[in-house]
């Protein structure tokens, strides 16, 4: 189904981004694997895509920097000639209670998680509009919907992504471009390993399906929303959270 | 000069809005005569900026309503 399709996945060196990149690279998909710091991990993602018969282009870029984003999208267009799918997945955490949170921790999380998505969308919109086709997915989080003590910065940025998703969906609908968000719940990745055992157990207790999710669970939702089967779905938030938020 | 600008502008409008070349007169308005919506106009402005290597501010862009407005603007601002 993804034969010849071109996808950009930000933050694709590991975790959920890697699983999404691998999923979109199946069946002959072309994937631009963006990473910020870990080139070896990004190369591993690319190798996994190629092993499945897809094409991968690894591009380093800090999504919070406009010049980097321009270079990333230009590299994608140079290599593959078009962009069908954008997945804004790159995200960081700088957790801490509000009273002790530094300005830099607030800004860093917003710059990568929210500004980065805005910059990427702005950059891919023109090539997508010209072809009257495209699908954009923003990876948000359940904490953007229900909040989380210790993550005022992260949850605010993730909630912001939901507003961004809906507004862009309205702006671009007339050009046959769909824009949706996927909200993972508690997914086992390096990022959530930092939570510690106690917090992880508390998380699991609040999940009706009784277990943590995997990056592949999230990737499957992205694959659906970017497929022609979801062509009539736009402006939505799809939770992949084992029933945590209903 | 204005004629040359008009021809280049015309070509971009034909490509972007898929309208007949005959309909593109200097008096034609983008919205009513050429059927452009607000996104079309943003795209047109961006392509004109690329084609003529100039920057059209949002303030100036808002004042543009006819093809003639574009040709005049470009003729006046081209370096």
Image (tube, rainbow, N blue to C red):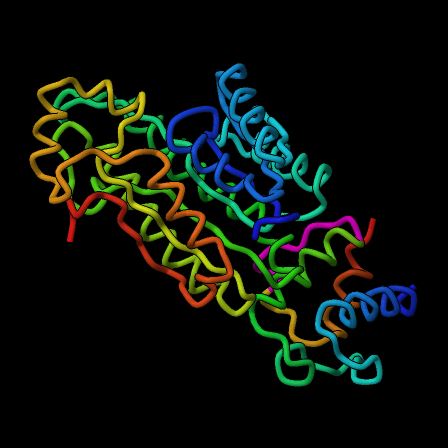
Horizontally, residue A106 falls left or right of residue A225, namely left
- The count of marks equals 0
Horizontally, residue A191 falls left or right of residue A151, namely right
Residue visible at 82% across and 61% down in the picture: B75
Residue visible at 74% across and 50% down in the picture: B54
Image coordinates of residue A35 in percent, x first then y, are 51, 25
Any magenta on residue B60? yes
Image coordinates of residue B17 in percent, x first then y, are 71, 73
On the image, which quarter does residue B43 sit in?
Answer: bottom right
Image coordinates of residue A232 in percent, x first then y, are 44, 68
A194 over A206 or under it: above or below: above
Quadrant (top left, top right, bottom left, bottom right) of the C terminus of chain A:
bottom left
Image: magenta residue range: B52-61
A106 over B11 or under it: above or below: above
A203 over A219 or under it: above or below: above
Q: Nearer the viewer, residue B23 or A157?
A: A157
Residue visible at 16% across and 17% down in the picture: A196
Residue visible at 57% across and 34% down in the picture: A52
Horizontally, residue B23 falls left or right of residue A85, namely right
Q: Nearer the viewer, residue B64 or A198?
A: A198
Q: Nearer the viewer, residue A172 or B33?
A: A172
Image coordinates of residue A201 in percent, x first then y, are 9, 26
Any magenta on residue A8? no
């Amino acid at each position: 189904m993804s034969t010849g399709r071109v996808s950009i996945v930000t933050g694709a060196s590991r975790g959920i981004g890697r699983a999404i990149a691998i999923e979109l690279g199946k069946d002959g998909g072309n994937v631009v694997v963006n990473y910020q710091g870990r080139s070896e991990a990004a190369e591993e993602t690319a190798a996994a895509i190629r092993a499945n018969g897809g094409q991968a282009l690894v591009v380093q870029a800090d999504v919070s920097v406009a010049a980097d984003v321009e270079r990333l999208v230009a590299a994608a267009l140079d290599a593959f000639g078009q962009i069908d799918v954008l997945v804004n997945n790159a995200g960081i955490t700088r957790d801490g209670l509000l009273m002790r949170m530094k300005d830099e921790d607030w800004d860093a999380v917003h710059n990568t998680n929210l500004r980065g998505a805005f910059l990427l969308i702005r950059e891919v919109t023109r090539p997508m509009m010209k072809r009257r086709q495209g699908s954009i997915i923003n990876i948000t989080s359940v904490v953007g919907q229900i909040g989380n003590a210790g993550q005022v910065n992260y949850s605010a940025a993730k909630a912001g992504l939901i507003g961004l998703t809906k507004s862009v969906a309205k702006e671009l609908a007339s050009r046959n471009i769909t824009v949706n968000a996927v909200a993972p719940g508690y997914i086992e990745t390096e990022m959530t390993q930092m939570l510690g055992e106690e917090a992880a157990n508390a998380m699991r207790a609040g999940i009706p399906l009784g277990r943590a999710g995997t990056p592949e669970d999230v990737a499957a939702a992205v694959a659906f929303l970017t497929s022609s089967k979801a062509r009539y779905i736009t402006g939505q938030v799809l939770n992949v959270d084992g029933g945590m938020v209903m | 000069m204005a004629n040359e600008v008009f021809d280049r502008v015309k070509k971009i409008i034909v490509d972007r809005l898929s309208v007949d070349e005959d309909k593109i007169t200097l008096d034609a308005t983008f919205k009513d005569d050429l059927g452009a919506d607000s996104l079309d106009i943003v795209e047109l402005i961006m392509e004109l900026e690329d084609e003529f290597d100039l920057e059209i501010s949002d303030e100036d862009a808002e004042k543009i309503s006819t093809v003639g407005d574009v040709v005049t603007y470009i003729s006046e601002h081209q370096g």
